[in-house]
Amino acid sequence: MRSIKAIFIKQTKDMIKNFSVLIMFILFPLVAFVMTALVADRVEDMPSTMFTTMMASIFVGMSLIMSSSAVISEDRENKSLRFLVIAGVKPHSYLLGIGGVIFIASFFTSVAFGFIGRFNQSEFLSFMIIMMSGCIASILLGAIIGILSSNQQAAAGLSMPLAMVLGFGPMVAMFNEQVKSVIRSFYTYQINVIVNDFSSGLKEPLIVIWINITVLAGLFTFAYKKKGLRN
């Protein structure tokens, strides 16, 4: 517990100083707010939640992967992770410390999306459940990329194409059945399903997302044990 707290405090301070990571949690809800006010609210046949759901899906599928991979690859590049592993910090302690900061920041960003979307009480609850589940999956995927990357540049090169596929893939799947058949097994597609149609039900999407989370958690533990001590 002490190691988790120490890592959490360290990462909070680092994140506040890292503008390139911090801006990702502000930019997407800001774009959603501006586009809703200037476009969706003024076009009669356009759903008022269109830009909110679009930006929320992209936020989970893109920015969280890139931000968490950047944070952890920075630890590897600065040799911080090497010292933590030598000190006996377990994979779950490191992940809870680092991921906890990103998760909390994601929570407030998701709440902002919820208010911008003007969801009713039940819709807001469903939105937050699916968003936070998706956030966990993206943080894990970003963490895996960060562990496998020797520096931030390598992490960016690996996370960007994956983030693009997971962030924009669900939108492409709406118009292409072949893409849909492939990407529906990934958590970002399930998030897109719910945020665009709250009547579709949470059960199946949550099952798919938590299967994704379980697999990613196992991969992170394996990668941490194998790569944590390497430069």
Image (spheres, rainbow, N blue to C red):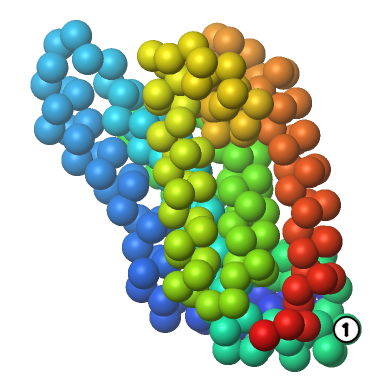
Q: Quadrant of residue 129?
A: top right
Image x and y of residue 203, in percent = 72, 18
Q: Amino acid at mark 1?
A: Gly
* Label 1 environment density (alpha carbons within 10 Å; few <14, some 14–19, many ≥20): few
Q: Quadrant of the C terminus?
A: bottom right
Q: Residue at x 69, y 33 (%)?
A: 209
Left or right relative to 6: residue 110: left
Residue with the mark numbered 1? 88
Residue 156 spot, x, y in % from top left: 46, 64
Task: Name the residue at 49% across, 74% down.
Answer: 152
Residue 101 visible to an observer of this rendering: no
Of all residues shown, which one is farthest toward the front? 178
Residue at 19% across, 40% down:
34
Helix, strand or loop status at disc 1: loop
| 172 horizontally vs 183: left or right | left
* Picture quadrant of residue 99: bottom right
Residue at x-position 57% and y-position 26%: 183
Relative to the observer, which residue lies in front, 117 or 193? 193
Residue 110 x, y percent position in the rendering = 48, 43
Q: Nearer the viewer, residue 102 or 58?
A: 58
Q: Please determine whether, in this image, residue 202 is positioned above or below residue 63.
A: above
